[in-house]
Image (tube, grey):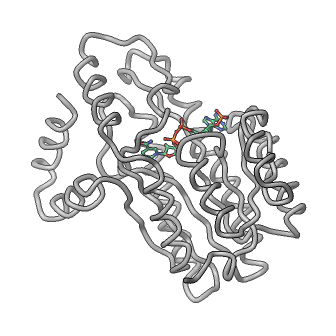
């Protein structure tokens, strides 16, 4: 059976302390790839460092501190030998609330973190991959880029923007040795909801929030996403990878391509308890 280390030697995974990023890091380590993984608090990565000496390297990294995040990436990239074979921009968080009820600075900060900082990291990664004419850039976007989540406007915009960046870079990577993967998870059972910033919850948002909690509890374990990412990295080809439950990752996107936009919007609202 082919292993990833036959193609790739090193990887950067943002948000490796828990959830999807952690299983991505574990999968890569299991395949013999050296991993630089991030957390705002690297002590959360201590077990990965202890379990994989010489193969896992913790990196302190906060999307909200762009300058330091780019510097941390660049230092890790040098330590990896002058560039990563795989860069997984995974770190992210949700903000839940009515658009007008929250201060606009909250939404703007989310865009600056999840789009602005990630764009800078992708720029550095893509530039380095271009100079070596090889590498695999993965953006962990979301099915929310296609089916926006109610009361998560900043998140929806950030993920739609990230997917648009992936598609833009896919054009530029054509004919090169670089692959750009837009990885779109449906819901996975992680701490995402618990970590979500919820400000000024109003009566109107309650059904959508309850539906979101129920969906996340019933969703697949994150290991499935790691298997899907592994397959995509082995293919080493640019493209969109939808990952998750059969309905969210496959049936809903297919139906959405066939049905009128107004029907899709109605069905999505019903699905999310509105
Ligand atoms: N779970 C889902 O259903 C789902 C669905 C679609 C897309 N996604 C996307 O998948 C990615 C991972 O989500 P998850 O479900 O694994 O969430 P999670 O369990 O909450 O993990 C989030 C990870 O991102 C890091 N992180 C969060 N905010 C950060 C910040 N401001 N700066 C730097 N790092 C930060 C966290 O690290 P520290 O707290 O240790 O710093 C943690 O490692 C996110 O981009 C999310 O949008 C998730």
Residue plotted at (50% across, 22% down) = 197
Ligand 1 shows up in the quarter that is top right
Up the image or down, 220 lies above or below 136; here it is above
55 to the left or right of 89: right
Residue plotted at (35% across, 54% down) = 244
49 to the left or right of 159: right
Q: Report x, y in % for residue 265.
A: 17, 44
State the quadrant of the N terminus.
Answer: bottom right
Q: Report x, y in % for residue 138.
A: 57, 63
Q: Report x, y in % for residue 123.
A: 69, 61
Residue plotted at (26% across, 10% down) = 203
Up the image or down, 197 lies above or below 264; here it is above
Q: Report x, y in % for residue 221.
A: 42, 46
Q: How many marks?
A: 0
State the quadrant of the C terminus.
Answer: top left
Instruction: Give the camera-side residue of 11 and 220.
Output: 220
Q: Residue furthest bottom?
A: 175
Residue plotted at (59% across, 40% down) = 18
Instruction: Give the camera-side residue of 191 and 166.
Output: 191
61 to the left or right of 140: right
């Amino acid at each position: 059976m082919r292993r990833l280390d036959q193609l790739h030697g090193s990887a950067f995974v943002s948000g490796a302390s828990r959830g999807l990023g952690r299983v991505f890091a574990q999968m890569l380590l299991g395949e013999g790839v050296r991993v630089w993984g991030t957390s705002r608090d690297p002590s959360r990565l201590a077990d990965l460092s202890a379990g994989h000496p010489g193969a896992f390297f913790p990196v302190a990294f906060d999307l909200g501190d762009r300058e330091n995040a780019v510097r941390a990436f660049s230092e890790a990239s040098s330590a990896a030998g002058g560039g990563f074979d795989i860069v997984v921009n995974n770190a992210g968080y949700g903000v839940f609330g009515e658009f007008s009820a929250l201060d606009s600075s909250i939404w703007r900060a989310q865009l600056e973190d999840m789009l602005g900082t990630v764009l800078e990291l992708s720029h550095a990664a893509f530039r380095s991959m271009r100079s070596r004419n090889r590498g695999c850039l993965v953006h962990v976007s979301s099915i929310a880029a296609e089916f926006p989540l109610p009361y998560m406007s900043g998140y929806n915009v950030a993920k739609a923007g990230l997917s648009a960046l992936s598609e833009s870079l896919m054009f530029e990577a054509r004919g090169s040795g670089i692959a750009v993967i837009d990885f779109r998870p449906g819901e996975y059972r992680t701490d995402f909801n618990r970590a979500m910033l919820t400000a000024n919850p109003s009566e109107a948002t309650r059904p959508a929030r309850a539906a979101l909690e129920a969906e996340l509890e019933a969703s697949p374990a994150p290991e499935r996403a790691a298997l899907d990412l592994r397959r995509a990295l082995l293919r080493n080809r640019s493209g969109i990878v939808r990952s998750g439950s059969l309905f969210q990752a496959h049936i809903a996107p297919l139906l959405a391509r066939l049905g009128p936009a107004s029907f899709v919007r109605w069905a999505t609202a019903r699905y999310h308890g509105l």
